[in-house]
Amino acid sequence: MLVSYVIPCYRSEKTLPVVVREIDEKMKTLPGYTHEIIMVCDGSPDNVWKVICDLSREKASRRGILFSKNFGQHAALMAGIRAAGGERIICLDDDGQTPASEADRLLEALDNGADVAYARYAHKQHSLFRNLGTMMNEEMAYRMLGKPKALFVSSYFAMRRFVADEIIRYENSYPYLIGLVLRTTSNIVNVDVNHRARQTGSSGYTLSKLISLWMNGFTAFSVKPLRIATLVGTLSAIGGFLYGLYTIVKKFVRPDVPVGFSALMSAVVLFGGLILLMLGMVGEYVGRTYISANRAPQYVIRERTEDPDAPEKDPRMNKAADIK
C-alpha cells in the first residue's frame, strides 16, 4: 500500500532533510507499505527549494512543488494532497517537531477503521504564542464548525484516500483543512504521539496569519457568525427600546432631572460600534464570496521537480522572472 507524505515547507532548509530521512528510515520498518514524499515550497525566502530539488534527485519517490509566492500552509497542503497518489496520506510539519518516526501509530488507527487520525500531544513544545493560537483555533472549530469537544486537531494527521478525494474537490479561494475534514467525515480519532522541541528557527505563524486562518474557518464553513450578529443586533434593539421607555417614564415621573448627555453618548457609541462590527462581518462574507466568484486561485505553481528544466537553485533569485 502506498503512503503519501505531504510536507509544506517554509524556512526549513536545515530541518527538511532530517525529516525526509526520518520518514525513509521509519518506512523501512513497516512491511507492506511503500511511500512517496511530496514537499511544497510555500514561497520560502531561504534556499529550501534547492534542498527540495537535491532531495528529489536522490530518489524518484520524492517530489517537490514550488509556489510563486507565499500562499499559506493550508494552500500548500491542498497542492500536496492533489499531487498525492497514495491510499493513505500523512501530513506533517517540516521542522521536525511532528515525529515522522511515529507515523505508524497514525497508520494503525486508519487500519483499525478510522477515516482520519490526528496526532495529540501530551506535552507540546511550541512557544506560548503558538500554544495560545492553537487553543483559540480549537475553540473556534468547536464553536463554529461543530468539532467534537474532545477531539484535538493538529498539523500532523493521516487520512484515507476517499477523504483526500473529497477535500481536493474544494476549489474556492480560502481552503481550511479542518473544516474540509469535519464536513467529510465524523469518524475521526486522536492518536497520542510525542512532540519535539524546535531545534532551529521559529514558527512561521504570525498573529496576522493566525487571524487570517481563523477568518477562513469563520467565513468559509459556517454561517454562525452571521447568526450571532443577528442575535446581538436583536438584543441591542430590544435594549435600546427598553432604555427609551425608561427615559420617557423617568421624564414624566421626575421632570426636574435632566436627561443625561453622557448616557446618550454612551448609547450612541455602543450601538454605532455594534452596527459597524456587524457590517464588517457581513462585508467579510460578501468580499470572500466576490473573490471566490472571480475564481482567484488557491495557489500558483511556478515549478515542479519532475519538470525537465527544474532549476538548480530557487528561480526567485532572478527578480525579473518573478510572477506578479
Image (cartoon, rainbow, N blue to C red):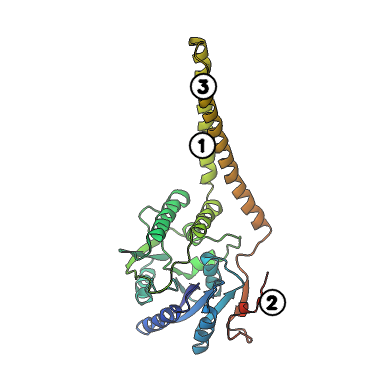
Mark 3 lies on residue: 260
Q: Residues within 10 Å of mark 2 (few under 14, many from 20)?
A: few
Horizontally, residue 164 falls left or right of residue 293, namely: left
Density class for disc 1 (Cα within 10 Å; few <14, some 14-19, many ≥20) is few
User: In front: 112, or 148?
Assistant: 148
Residue at the image point whose x is 39% and y is 65% from the top: 118
- SS under mark 1: helix
Q: State how far apart marks 1 and 2 are (Cα).
A: 52 Å
Q: Between disc 2 and disc 3, whose residue precedes?
A: 3
Residue 183 numbered tag: none
Report the residue marked by disc 1. 231
Counting from the top left corner in percent of width and height, residue 155 is at 43, 66
Asked which quadrant contains residue 65, the reply is bottom right
Report the front residue among 195 and 86: 195
Question: Three-letter amino acid code at disc 2?
Answer: Ala
Q: Residue at x 52, y 88 (%)?
A: 57
Horizontal relation, residue 226 to residue 201: left or right:
right
Image point 53% across, 21% down: which residue? 244
Q: Is residue 243 above or below residue 204?
A: above
Q: Are marks 1 and 2 in contact (CB under 8 Å)?
A: no
Residue position for label 2: 320
| Residue 275 seen in this snapshot | yes
The reply, left or right, for residue 185 in relation to residue 168 is left
Quadrant placement of the C terminus:
bottom right
| Residue 84 seen | no
Classify 59 as above or below 262.
below
Q: Which one is earlier in the sequence, the residue at label 1 or at label 3?
A: 1
At label 1, the amino acid type is: Leu
The amino acid marked with disc number 3 is: Gly
Q: Is residue 155 above or below residue 214?
A: below
Figure label count: 3
